[in-house]
């Protein structure tokens, strides 16, 4: 080891105080550096991937994070028990907890991160803004004072001018943050933010900023050592966000000039030095391109930890940031100086979440019956694709933690090439058993506006119409799905004894089967609906192709199973390769252009169940009732908010399914509800 700092003690064992993909990722580098690795786990994670991959693992406590991953004493105790000389906190959990760092200092354990004083300086958004103003780092106009009187905050907001953004001073992860469009909505937004901030951070202080309408989120990766050196490892553009949470990130930021890069980089290093920073940090800026703005940038916050999206920086710089962190923690100087750092090519990261984009991104749980990516089958170069994941096939996704399952990171010579690789890789990612945002990521990454770099933090909102548009499928998609459905039916029939069948489906005679296909959103529609397509398939025997009749057209169609889920669908001699998966009666077909999901059924087996107007509202997931917003008996219009639930640290609003009134609520504010519990009885108006 080269020069070491007198304050640091060398260590040979690293404890990673985290879970999921980041724990696995940190341990990977630690192992490569010859360190012994220790994982910690809650009861829900006793057999999780990070535990399986560690040399040793210590139980912290029950599933709830505050009784396990957030328990300072338990983590310190685990380090002592295993002789871990250092702790890497990952992101989230204890990573920006000053009290934790102090506890480690007291116990003589090295914290892989900045000193407690630097965390304190940035931990509070309001205090950080005051400090940055002193260091000459540009700020968004706003109010970040201590006086938290409701009327005063309202006056400040009025002065700043709407729209404004309310932010929890103690906030992070987009929680406790709301845009307020006008004065009338201010109080309600303030109350909501305070509730969320209280629940997530135990603190209700707010700050107000001018809400920039077309900003890009561009952040700078900085690194400082304990010898007074500081560098920036360029920027990441994280403008594609949903509810202020990043979804797709890239590096470098498109359209960046060398001059702006240097200016922002220097400002970021200045910010870090101002607070005596050591280790990896990220200085987040808003880059404003709205009317009359030519790219002014404003400090937003500094995250005093490794970021989720650090891999895109690793891809373009060829550096391992976790290795840098560990070397700095060992007291070594930074591995490279500013003029030794360069950018090569372009990189994207897509965050795979267990959530349902079709149901307002509701977090999803379940068992991953398959989690795989066939790089070879998709013709991808393993040097250009990286999957940082905390799960494997067979793992259970619970409701206890953040729903992010994995990150897909790609590299290319330039942005277009990297984007093409991203789309190919997203198509090759096969996740089954748990609903994910995979297809949504593909819709984002194939979106023409994204390709054209029309980036700003409201990208998803602005392109909602095209990102969520009901899918218009062509004859190729219907024929492909029909083929898969028909083959499945034929297989089922053939595996039964032909003597027992009463449906006219006999061997050695041409088989004709009629099936209907529709978007899964229209499963209730019957075959006369314009949303439903009828396909008739005929073939003489299992060895022959199908003749498919769709809307008067007849196609010769053949299905061939390749390796894994890959199939080849040949329609009138045109062969297409795709991934085909079955989810009950839904056929899912994926290729680099996108995902097709079609529900099919055999027509003579339709059960014409009728559909009643909804008279109950059930809890979409396990959570807590936060507030009842109307009285029982009070007349409401369709879509009006009825009650607020909190689940997975986010608020969800239940709205009226129709005009009518609530007959009764089954729960009160503060009650815990289980998934599927009836929340209220609703009486639609006559
Ligand atoms: P958190 O710490 O909760 O992630 P940030 O302060 O980092 O909150 O803000 C998260 C995101 O919210 C930013 O990336 C940006 O998209 C948006 N945002 C924050 N401040 C503003 C602002 N003043 N105007 C417009 N958008 C903003």
Image (cartoon, rainbow, N blue to C red):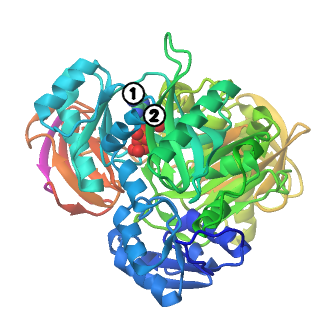
**5 or 324, which is in the foreground?**
5
Q: Residue at x 29, y 41 (%)?
A: 613
Q: Quadrant of the C terminus?
A: top left
Label 2 C-beta lies within 8 Å of the nearest ligand 1 atom: no
Residue lying at the far top of the rendered structure: 292
> Where residue 513 appears, x then y in whole percent?
70, 48
Q: Is residue 235 above or below residue 5?
A: above
Residue at horizontal 35%, vertical 57%?
A: 621
**Is residue 504 in sight in this rendering?**
no
Residue range highlighted in magenta: 660-668
Say which label, 1 or 2, has the lower sequence index.
1
| Chief SS of the magenta region | strand
Where ligand 1 lies, by quadrant?
top left
Residue 192, position as x, y percentages in the image: 23, 41
Query: Is residue 67 or residue 103 the one in the foreground?
Result: 103
Mark 2 sits on what residue? 299
Helix or strand or loop: what does disc 2 sit on? Answer: strand
User: Residue 391: horizontal and vertical position, in percent?
Assistant: 60, 67
Q: Is residue 82 above or below residue 435?
A: below
Q: Using residue 423 as the reference point, say whether residue 221 is left or right of it.
A: left
User: Which mark, by number, is residue 140?
Assistant: 1
**Residue 297 in the image, given as x and y percentages of width and height:** 51, 26
Label 1 secondary element? loop
Q: Is mark 1 within 8 Å of ligand 1?
A: yes
Task: Examine the rendering and report whether any part of residue 514 can be seen.
Answer: yes
């Amino acid at each position: 080891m080269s020069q070491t700092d007198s304050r640091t003690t060398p260590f040979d064992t690293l404890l990673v105080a985290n879970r999921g993909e980041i724990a696995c990722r940190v341990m990977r580098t630690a192992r490569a550096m010859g360190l012994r690795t220790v994982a910690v786990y809650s009861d829900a994670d006793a057999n999780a991937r990070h535990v399986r991959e560690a040399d040793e693992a210590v139980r912290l406590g029950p599933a709830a994070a505050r009784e396990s991953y957030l328990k300072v004493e338990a983590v310190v105790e685990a380090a002592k028990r295993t002789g871990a000389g250092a702790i890497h906190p990952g992101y989230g959990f204890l990573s920006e907890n000053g009290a934790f760092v102090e506890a480690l200092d007291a116990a003589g354990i090295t914290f892989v991160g900045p000193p407690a004083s630097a965390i304190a300086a940035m931990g509070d958004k309001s205090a950080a803004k005051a400090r940055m103003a002193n260091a000459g780092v540009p700020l968004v106009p706003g109010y970040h004072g201590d006086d938290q009187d409701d009327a005063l905050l309202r006056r400040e907001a009025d002065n700043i001018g709407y729209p404004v953004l309310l932010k929890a001073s103690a906030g992070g992860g987009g929680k406790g943050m709301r845009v307020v469009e006008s004065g009338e909505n201010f109080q309600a937004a303030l109350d909501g933010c305070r509730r969320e901030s209280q629940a997530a951070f135990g603190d209700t202080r707010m700050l107000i900023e001018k809400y920039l309408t077309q900003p890009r989120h561009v952040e700078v990766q900085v690194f400082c050592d304990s010898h007074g050196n500081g560098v920036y490892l360029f920027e990441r553009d994280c403008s594609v966000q949903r509810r202020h949470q990043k979804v797709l990130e890239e590096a470098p930021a498109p359209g960046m000039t060398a001059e702006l890069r240097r200016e922002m980089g220097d400002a970021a290093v200045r910010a870090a030095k101002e607070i005596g920073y050591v280790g990896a940090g990220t200085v987040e800026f808003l880059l404003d391109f709205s009317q009359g703005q030519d790219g002014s940038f404003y400090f937003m916050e500094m995250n005093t930890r490794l970021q989720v999206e650090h891999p895109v920086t690793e891809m373009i710089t060829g550096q391992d940031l976790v290795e840098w962190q560990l070397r700095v923690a060992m007291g070594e100087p930074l591995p490279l100086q500013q003029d030794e750092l360069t950018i090569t090519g372009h990189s994207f990261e897509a965050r795979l979440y267990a959530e349902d984009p079709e149901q307002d991104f509701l977090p999803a749980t379940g068992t991953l019956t398959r989690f795989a990516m066939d790089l070879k089958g998709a013709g991808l170069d393993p040097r250009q694709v990286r999957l940082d994941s905390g799960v494997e096939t067979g793992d259970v996704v619970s409701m206890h933690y953040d729903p992010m399952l994995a990150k897909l990171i790609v590299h290319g010579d330039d942005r277009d090439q990297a984007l093409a690789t991203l789309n190919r890789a997203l198509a090759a990612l096969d996740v089954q058993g748990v609903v994910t945002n995979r297809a949504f990521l593909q819709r984002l990454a194939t979106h023409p506006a994204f390709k054209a770099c029309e980036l700003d933090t409201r990208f998803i909102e602005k392109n909602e119409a095209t990102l969520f548009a009901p899918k218009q499928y062509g004859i190729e998609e219907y024929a492909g799905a029909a083929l898969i459905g028909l083959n499945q039916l034929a297989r089922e029939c053939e595996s039964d004894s032909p003597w027992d069948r009463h449906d006219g489906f006999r061997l050695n005679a041409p088989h004709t089967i009629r099936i209907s296909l529709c978007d899964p959103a229209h499963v209730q529609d019957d075959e006369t609906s314009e949303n439903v397509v009828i396909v008739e398939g005929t073939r003489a025997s299992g060895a022959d192709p199908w003749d498919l009749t769709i809307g008067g057209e007849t196609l010769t169609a053949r299905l061939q199973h390749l390796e894994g889920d890959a199939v080849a669908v040949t329609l009138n001699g045109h062969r297409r390769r795709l991934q085909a998966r079955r989810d009950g009666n839904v056929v899912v077909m994926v290729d680099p252009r996108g995902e097709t999901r079609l529900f099919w059924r055999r027509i003579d087996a339709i059960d014409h169940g009728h559909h009643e107007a909804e008279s109950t509202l059930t809890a979409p997931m396990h959570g807590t009732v936060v507030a009842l917003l109307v009285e029982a008996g009070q007349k409401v219009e369709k879509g009006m908010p009825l009650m607020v639930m909190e689940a997975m640290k986010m608020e969800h609003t239940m709205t009226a399914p129709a005009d009518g009134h609530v007959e009764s609520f089954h729960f009160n504010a503060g009650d815990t509800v289980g998934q599927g519990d009836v929340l209220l009885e609703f009486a639609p108006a006559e």
